[in-house]
Amino acid sequence: MEVLQTLINGTLTGAVYGVVALSFVVIYRASKIVNLAQGQVIMVSAFFVWFFVQKMEMPLWAGLPLSLVASVCMGAVVERLVFRRLIGQPVFSVVMASIGLLILLQGAVQLIFGAQTRPFPQVLPDGAWKIGDILVNKSLLIGALLTFLLTELLNLFFTHTSAGLRLAAVAEDHVTAMSLGISVRNATAIAWMLGVTLSLIAAIILLSGKVLGLQAAEIGLRALPVALLGGLESVRGASLAGILIGIGEALASRYIDPHTAGAASMIFPYLLMVFLLLFRPQGFFGWKRIERL
Amino acid sequence: MSMLPSGVFFQSYAAEQGLLRTWPQRLGLVASFLLLASMGWLMNNYWLGILTLGGITLVAVLGLHITIGMAGLLNLGQSAFVGIGAFVAASMAANGWSIWVTLPCSGLAAGIVSILFGLPAVRIKGFYLALTTIAAQIIFPIVMIRLPDGWFGGSAGMSVDPPVIFGWVINTPRSYFLLVLSVAAVAFLVATNLGRSRAGRAFRAIHDNDIASSVVGVNLAKVKIQAFFVGALFAGFSGALYAYFVRYVSTDQFTLWLSVWYVGMLIVGGMHTPFGAMLGVAVITLLQEGVHLLGTKVLSSFTGMSGGTVFSMTNVVLGGVIILMLLFEPLGLAHRWSILKSSYRIWPYPRG
């Protein structure tokens, strides 16, 4: 029973990692941009939700669409001002720009909203369902179902529509894609729209009914090993890897943490990532890149 | 090697290859070094502290210049390696070792740990490496505070006694500044010469094209790990100096944030030359102080002004500067400087 409860908790938490990893993967898969500032983007979306729903006291049906509009506007500004100009530049510049963005957004949020924590609106239902002896957290379960739905939809988009298939060429190489007549600009725009929307959903699943602060951005770096484990190009891989890491973390925190003062579950994803990179650099479902001179 | 003015020529290869090739260059170097050293007497303790910290930071950023700028291996965990150096120095100093032993040992310790996280570099490249170094950065505090208290002080951190060199206790800001200045100068010289050596050329080769360089006989795995090791070696030295300077080390001094700042300094200054690293450290430190001054002077009239606001303003400025540099001058301020220099040299002719 106890093991089952641990597994279920792990799976549900893992699905949250999955949806955050999904937002990394979607941006990468559509535009070959590794956005290390994804955690900060999620934080900004969360602050928009807080601003419209909690501060302006709007009802959810008005506040959430408005937050989506605000987030998408932010994504468009970032894409237009920074990443569109870096099309065709080495990956290094893009990663560095995302680091610059990370610092900028973190600073800007602290400057505008302040560093104090505040309650995040209860968007998903509170409490837990009781099945036999097992408790299932309601908002996490809904979040997990939402994650799988999104994963399948995105997978369908990327593998079965012509717009999605075109993005595969962009993720392969900007210059090649352009020479095939594919608009890389459109691709980065689509990538950011999707990425920001996913960030908003991730923020809602992650924070519903909890406290919101600058620490919310840390989820970005926690989900990085997940995105890598699944393979940066694989939409389905992200949520699968999320569940794998979630279960691993839950088991580690239940059975190993008492002996290591809580260290095991915290470093487990990162150790797994370093280890995996040694033996399978493209992750479980990522593309194997063949390079030649 | 930049272009020399017309009429300057050399009669031997050694003279042509020298770091300083003409007497004004030698004079300029001695003068600027003396000027820097004289800051120990001219500046008040606050600015001397900033200058000292700048020197310590420079050593770490020079290490990053080797790993990132020369070898092209992205390292976002430099401050963890600085931290390892600082903790090793603090721990050894507490056991009575002198700075002559602790300084090299902390460098080596950081270097050895960096190999663990650099190993995946053999298989991967580019930004994937950023992720393993981020892992190093995140694992570092978690592991450090859970090691036995006797090793590195646990979560309480460790205090450090001032170093003694030739029976001279370095406990005034001035003497410590002179110590840091000399170490930073040596580090600068080593980084400069490394770039001109066989190893440095191998680093540059894998930076430009790793497959091509492996074809011409560069041992990729070895060279990548070497580049990582040397970069972390510098970080270790920087950490030891930091431990002696602040006289207290704890894990929350070495955050991912600091690593990101180091990389930011390198980008702003220009990552391909040690001079760029120096320029970056100087500019970002001055910018930070400027924002700090402006923040406390101008904004103190507003209510709700706190240290956090100044910190966040600094972040906004630094993040903005990094993005602007990447968009408009990816080669950094050092490139602007060399353009300026060459156009001055060939004046009145237009720059080619």
Image (cartoon, rainbow, N blue to C red):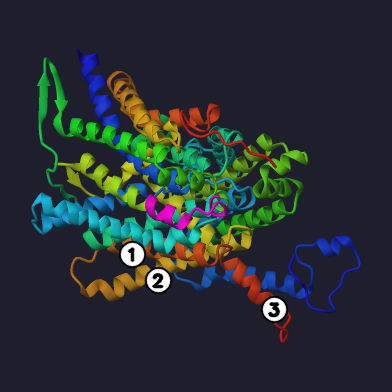
Q: Which amino acid lies under the numbered mark 2 shown in the image of this protein?
A: Gly
Q: Quadrant of residue B138?
A: top left
Q: Nearer the viewer, residue A149 or A83?
A: A149
Q: Which mark is residue B313?
A: 1
In the image, B314: left or right of B230?
Answer: left
The percent position of residue A286, horizontal first and vertical second, equals: 48, 33
> Callout 2: 10 Å neighbours few (<14), some, many (20+)?
few
Residue at position x 30%, y 75% from top?
B297
Instruction: Kindly report the distance in space between the C-alpha atoms of the residues bearing marks 2 and 3.
Output: 33 Å
Residue at the far top in the pictured view? A1
2 and 3 marks in contact (CB < 8 Å): no
Residue at image point 78% right, 41% down? B216
Residue B91 percent coordinates (x, y): 47, 37
Mark 3, residue position: B351
Q: Earlier in the sequence, mark 2 or mark 3?
A: 2
Q: Are marks 2 and 1 on the same chain?
A: yes
Q: Is residue B318 visible?
A: no
Seen from the viewer's position, the closer of residues B317 and B14 is B317
